[in-house]
Amino acid sequence: KLSKRLEMVSQYLLKNSTFADIGSDHAYLPCYAIKKGLAKYAIAGEVVEGPYQTAKQQVMECGYESSISVRKGDGLEVLQPNEVDCITIAGMGGPLIASILENGKDRLLGVKRLILQPNIGANHIRNWCVQNNWVIIAEEILEEDEKIYEIIVAENNERAEVTHLTDAELLLGPFLMQEKSDVFIKKWSDELKQWRIILDRMNLAENQEKIIERKLAIEKNISLVEEVLT
Ligand code: SAM
């Protein structure tokens, strides 16, 4: 059975899409999408030999060799221009997802939609989207097995909409901070607690001048989050 997290990612695939799942590991997501008729063709990309073999095995066991191409390579380098209309990248940190997109910019030609699921640091992805003219069209936050995950869906900004986001929107998510779900409130209340503990510790440290910038950054985040939560 597919995780709730990956199932939610799959719901954002464009109808009848051809998509690439980068960092596919077991290729669970491509296999599920083909099985459910959510996609007509998929590419599973993996950079590490072990997971690449596991993905190939899984696709073979499902008998999907004609609809899923498993490729070994770093990030988007496994793609040819105009090969897919959607890209999913799930289960990694936000900075890694953002760097995969940044390093593979030239492979995004023809891609209409990105469905990105960072485990942490979603703000790095929102930053990348704003800087590279991708518009965030939807977001999800969910809890599974006591972990909280975010999903960011972005589309190629063909209509040249304004993509600017405020500092609060970059950190918390423009849609998520409007919706303010219970999971969202839980996530950010926990973050606030952690930041306050860190600040208290920092205030006891010697050489305050060396940590002043980090302290200011945390204080800024605290006030951004407090404003949205209260
Ligand atoms: N996407 C699956 C999921 O969400 O359950 C698997 C997530 S797994 C934690 C991350 C996978 O990404 C690993 O199998 C790792 O080898 C792969 N990976 C990390 N960096 C990558 C890169 N630059 N290109 C392709 N795959 C990468």
Image (spheres, rainbow, N blue to C red):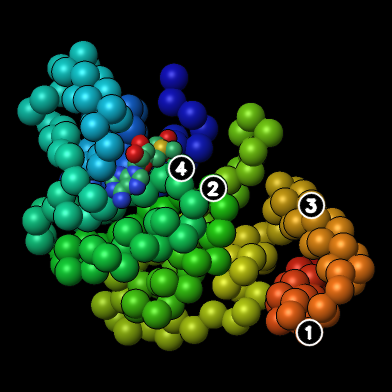
To which residue does mark 1 refer?
Answer: 209
Q: Residue at x 46, y 42 (%)?
A: 91
Q: CA distance from mark 4 to mark 3?
A: 21 Å
Q: CA distance from mark 1 to mark 3?
A: 28 Å
Q: With respect to residue 138, does 168 lie above or below?
A: below
Alpha-carbon neighbours of circle 4 within 10 Å: few (<14), some, or many (≥20)? some
Q: Earlier in the sequence, mark 1 or mark 4?
A: 4
* Quarter of the picture holding the C terminus: bottom right
Alpha-carbon neighbours of circle 2 within 10 Å: few (<14), some, or many (≥20)? some
Q: With respect to residue 163, does 87 lie above or below?
A: above
Q: CA distance from mark 4 to mark 2?
A: 6 Å
Q: Earlier in the sequence, mark 2 or mark 1?
A: 2
Q: CA distance from mark 1 to mark 4?
A: 37 Å
Front residue of 181 and 60: 60
Query: Mark 1: which amino acid?
Result: Glu
Query: Is disc 2's CB within 8 Å of ligand 1?
Result: yes
* Quarter of the picture holding the N terminus: top left
Q: Confirm or deny contact between disc 4 and disc 2 (CB under 8 A).
A: yes
- Marks counted in the figure total 4
Residue 119 is labelled as 2
To which residue does mark 3 refer?
Answer: 190
Q: Earlier in the sequence, mark 4 or mark 2?
A: 4
Front residue of 158 and 224: 224
Query: Mark 4: which amino acid?
Result: Gly
Please state the horizontal and vertical placement of residue 111, each as a whole percent of the image.
21, 61
To which residue does mark 4 refer?
Answer: 91
Query: Mark 3: which amino acid?
Result: Asp
Q: Residue at x 15, y 49 (%)?
A: 78
